[in-house]
Image (cartoon, rainbow, N blue to C red):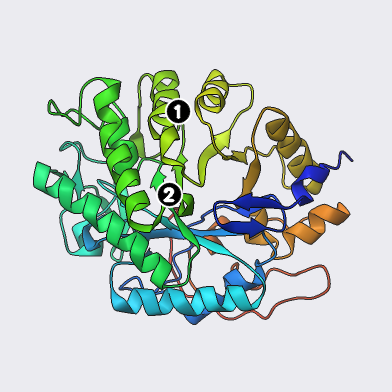
Amino acid sequence: MTHTTELFEPARLGPVDLPNRLLMAPLTRNRAEADGTPTPLMATYYAQRASAGLIIAEASTPNAVGQTYPNITAVHGPRHVAGWRRVTDAVREAGGRMFLQLQHGGRVGHPATSGLTPVAPSPVPLPGTIFTPDGHRPAVVPREMTAADIRATVADFARAARNALDAGFEGVEVHSANGHLLHQFLARNTNRRTDGYGGPVERRLRFTTEVTGAVAAEIGAERVGLRVSPGNTVNGIAEGETEEIYPALAERLGGLGLAYLHLVSADPDAPVFGGIRAAWPGTLVANPVLEEMSSDAVHRASGRLLAAGADLIALGRPFLANPDLVRRLRLGAPLNQVRDRYLMYVGGADGYTDYPALDGQPSSSSIVAFDGPRVA
């Protein structure tokens, strides 16, 4: 087995000292209350995984219209802050550290879920159906954001970042990936605007840079990361000019002094990876694609990314199924497999807090019915 010892070296991320270079990537799990308030079960889940160098908690909406699916967390009200505080307290007591991902769904939303018509850069609906409390329903045409909507949303992200710090997080990750609102502004097929936020690449970058800049101004750039997914087509996205967009975005934001830039499904052999690394002056977090769920596969993929210039490695499903992932990787031990994709989103402890550690089995409880795949 190829053992990538750099994974276990300490690192510093902004103001936070990390005991290792393994980050838990944000994963939507649909365990919040209907209004977006985190639950006690979520505190258990994250505390189980506190040995990660840093936990980046799941997508949390900065305003009501940004909600994507049922039981997604939020961070725009007092109950949300109090609920997240219980989570961060539990993780801190277990020796961990947390950032919170801020995500606005844009056109990935539905009035049956949020009570509001989704907003987006242009009135281009999500293809197909979307999961709601009433089951799968046809996506609706989003309302095109006005200049006032854009200003208000930028301000909402900044307030949400402040709320996150009040809730005990060390920082936040701005989500500009996976087909959600900021990604919709970057992509040609979802951004058909003719004003200063649409058209050529330099104008399509503007919303992401304004949101990230406002969040950095509110809580300090050293406490802010940005997540991007170059070339990702999830949620009906067709970017166009991928190899131009992301190095340009990295260069534009490089002077802010952000904590990190986080690449989803990072491929060290892709030209865009090299372009981003060359343009980005700070810490680069890479989320690898694994050919299988094993310690050896994690080490191989991580080693390639570190050799190509990544500084930290973010893992999603390996942490989902292995609360003691860091220990397992140190030992080269077998990894738990994700038992059932359905259990990722059903609610309750099954497939959530009941994955076994090497030396024991957390308790389980009954399943609460909830179907429909999601992407964090």
Q: For the residue carrying disc 2, how many other residues have a C-alpha within 10 Å: few (<14), some (14-19), or many (20+)? A: many
Image point (67%, 53%), residue name = 318
Mark pair 2, 1: CA separation: 26 Å
For residue 40, side relative to residue 315 (left or right): left
Q: Position of residue 61 (x, y in %)?
A: 33, 60
- Determine whether the residue tagged by mark 1 lies in a helix, strand or loop: loop
Question: Disc 2 marks which amino acid?
Answer: Ala
Residue drawn 65% across the image and 44% down it:
313
> Based on the displayed image, in which of its 4 quarters is residue 24 positioned?
bottom right
Checking the image for residue 231, the label placed there is 1
Which is in the foreground here, disc 2 or disc 1? 2
Instruction: From the top left corner, tell me how far across and down residue 71 is, in percent.
Output: 37, 68
Identified at 34% across, 38% down, the residue is 183
Q: Can I make out residue 91 in this image? A: yes
Disc number placed over residue 127 in the picture, else none = none
Can you give x and y, in whole percent of width and height, for residue 314 in the image?
A: 61, 47
Residue 181 screen position, x and y as percent: 29, 44
Q: Earlier in the sequence, mark 2 or mark 1?
A: 2
